[in-house]
Image (cartoon, helix red, strand yellow):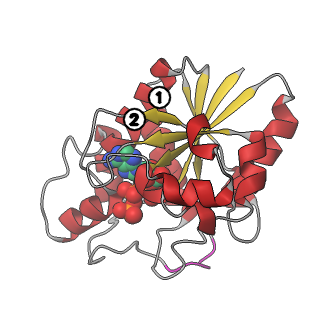
Amino acid sequence: LKLGVFGGTFDPIHTGHLVVAEEVRVRLALDEVLFVPAGHSPFKLDRAVTRAAHRMNMVALATEDNPHFRVSDMEVVRPGPSYSVDTLEELARAHGKDSGLFMMVGADALREFDRWHQPQRLLDVATLVCLARPEAPQLDPESLESVRRGATERVAVIEGPLIGVSSTNIRQRVSQGLSIKYLVSEPVEAYIYEHGLYKDSGGQGQFAWGVPT
Ligand code: ATP
């Protein structure tokens, strides 16, 4: 089994996530892409994030029409900060040695790879996949090389399509009353309005960390 693992806050999931996930799936001939919404992201402790149940529901809605996409609640139900290395080690145990794990990470997020929790261990269990974004179109080797020399050569780089959409954009646009049609999938758009998400957010999620889901 070749499994793509796509972690993120997904507050909310948008077209950029979906387009690159599909691109990686086809280019790397993955059997499946597993979307793993973060419980408590160690990198976003400084801002309010929408509660996990909403973020999970939106990922489920956005991915339901793709038979190769799945959603996991493993980080949401795990107590404490959501570390990718824990997720990947758990998946490696569950799927056995013969499966390949491909950890999908935006080029912006990879620049901070040396600040991740136990990045060396992560390199032992998974192949990194670097997703280009318009603001970070290329793999920046510095952080990776400081974790392990030569690590850059083992990263699979996916160079496009470049989609200039971020969750921050979406939250801001909703709070400004601007359209998000085509920037998120239709059921996600409907869900956001139905639940009144991001209305008064000023670009932040709606609930502070720690609010029970
Ligand atoms: P925010 O604007 O709230 O920081 P985001 O749009 O970056 O959110 P995340 O849920 O934090 O979304 O992203 C999850 C992963 O997807 C990260 O590795 C991120 O770099 C990557 N990613 C997000 N948007 C894109 C995009 N448009 N193209 C490529 N990769 C993306």
Cβ of mark 1 under 8 A from ligand 1: no
Q: Secondary structure at mark 2?
A: helix
Is residue 13 depicted above or below 175 in this figure?
Answer: above
Q: Does 126 lie within the magenta span?
A: no
Q: Which mark is residue 171?
A: none
Identify the residue under disc 1: 24
Cβ of mark 2 under 8 A from ligand 1: yes
Part of the protein shown in magenta? 208-212
* Left or right side of 142 for 93: right
Query: Residue 172's image quarter?
Result: bottom left
* Left or right side of 108 for 146: right
Q: 35 or 110, which is in the foreground? A: 110
Query: Residue 132's image quarter?
Result: top left
What residue appears at the point 46 percent right and 20 percent down from the top-left corner? 27
Q: Secondary structure at mark 1?
A: helix
- Mark 2 Cα shell of 10 Å, populated few (<14), some (14-19), many (≥20): many
Q: CA distance from mark 2 to mark 1?
A: 6 Å
Instruction: Find out whether the residues at labels 2 and 1 contact each other: C-beta distance under 8 Å.
Output: yes
Q: Amino acid at mark 1?
A: Val
Residue 2: percent from the left, percent from the top? 67, 23
Q: Which mark is residue 20?
A: 2
Residue 104: percent from the left, percent from the top? 54, 42
Residue 97: percent from the left, percent from the top? 86, 28
Q: 31 or 200, which is in the foreground? A: 31
- Mark 1 Cα shell of 10 Å, populated few (<14), some (14-19), many (≥20): many
